């Protein structure tokens, strides 16, 4: 939230309401959740911690966020299931491809935590991997900016936003969309990516309704 770390309940509740709108429209929603607000494995690795250990801690941070998100959805009367790529019996379910698809078909929101379950893979990699597995129509990358820009809008006021890009344009222009492992996975499986600003109220709904919002990356 405004403090830059931790979990902001008001943001969580707004996100839950926005996800609820999608469920009410009949859209199947899988949420792959990160942990950077609590913990970054790569950051601690720089400070000397073993990267594998740091990444394990990062995965647990995503489970904490997942628990908070599941709670917010339940309070908004949305049926949600939390799955983790690493077993945490008594806390949440183990990730199961068949179970996830079955839940989605029954209009349950499936929250996917602990990334891929492997160190060195980002949450973006997990989002693309799970998206391909469950045959999602699109991966929606929720960020703090409105989309993909020609340059960093925070540093360059003349930066403009792209409405649409191809995978190869992103690679040629070396635009920062997501890490290369995640991005090339999406490209190889022709999984479209839409980058949008989650801090903009109603943006998520506009994205799924096909209105002008964010940047779409396709073939």
Image (spheres, rainbow, N blue to C red):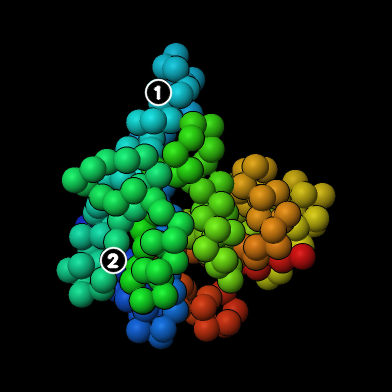
Q: Earlier in the sequence, mark 1 or mark 2?
A: 1
The location of residue 180, given as percent across then percent down, is 67, 43
> Residue 214 got which mark?
none
Q: Residue under circle 1?
A: 53
Task: Classify 98 as above or below 213.
Answer: above
Q: Residue under circle 2?
A: 80
The location of residue 101, given as percent across then percent down, is 44, 66
Residue at image coords 58%, 71%: 137
Residue at image coords 44%, 79%: 27
Instruction: Locate residue 53: give its quadrant.
Output: top left
Residue at image coords 44%, 17%: 50
Q: Quick check: marks 1 and 2 in contact, CB under 8 Å?
A: no
Q: Is residue 195 left or right of residue 81?
A: right
Does residue 162 appear in the picture of this structure?
A: no
The location of residue 62, given as percent across then percent down, is 35, 44
Q: CA distance from mark 1 to mark 2?
A: 29 Å
Task: Classify 210 as above or below 92.
Answer: below
148 and 104: which is toward the camera: 104
Task: Classify 46 as above or below 81.
Answer: above
How packed mark 1 is, by other alpha carbons closer than 10 Å (few <14, some 14-19, many 20 or more), is some
Helix, strand or loop status at disc 2: strand
């Amino acid at each position: 939230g405004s403090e830059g770390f931790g979990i902001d309940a008001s943001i969580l509740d707004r996100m839950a309401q926005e996800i609820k709108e999608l469920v009410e429209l009949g859209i199947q929603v899988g949420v792959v959740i990160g942990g950077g607000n609590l913990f970054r494995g790569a950051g601690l690795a720089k400070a000397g911690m073993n990267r594998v250990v740091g990444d394990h801690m990062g995965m647990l941070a995503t489970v904490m966020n997942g628990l908070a998100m599941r709670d917010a959805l339940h309070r908004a009367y949305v049926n949600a299931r939390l799955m983790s790529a690493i077993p945490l019996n008594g806390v949440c379910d183990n990730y199961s491809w068949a179970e996830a698809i079955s839940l989605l078909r029954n209009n349950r929101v499936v929250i996917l935590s602990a990334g891929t379950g492997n160190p060195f893979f980002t949450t973006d990699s997990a989002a693309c991997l799970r998206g391909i597995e469950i045959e999602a129509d699109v991966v929606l990358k929720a960020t703090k900016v409105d989309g993909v820009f020609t340059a960093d809008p925070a540093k360059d006021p003349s930066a403009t936003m792209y409405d649409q890009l191809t995978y190869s344009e992103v690679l040629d222009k070396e635009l920062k969309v997501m890490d290369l492992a995640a991005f090339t996975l999406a490209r190889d499986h022709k999984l479209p990516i839409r980058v949008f600003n989650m801090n903009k109220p109603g943006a998520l709904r506009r994205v799924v309704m096909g209105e002008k919002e964010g940047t779409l990356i396709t073939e």
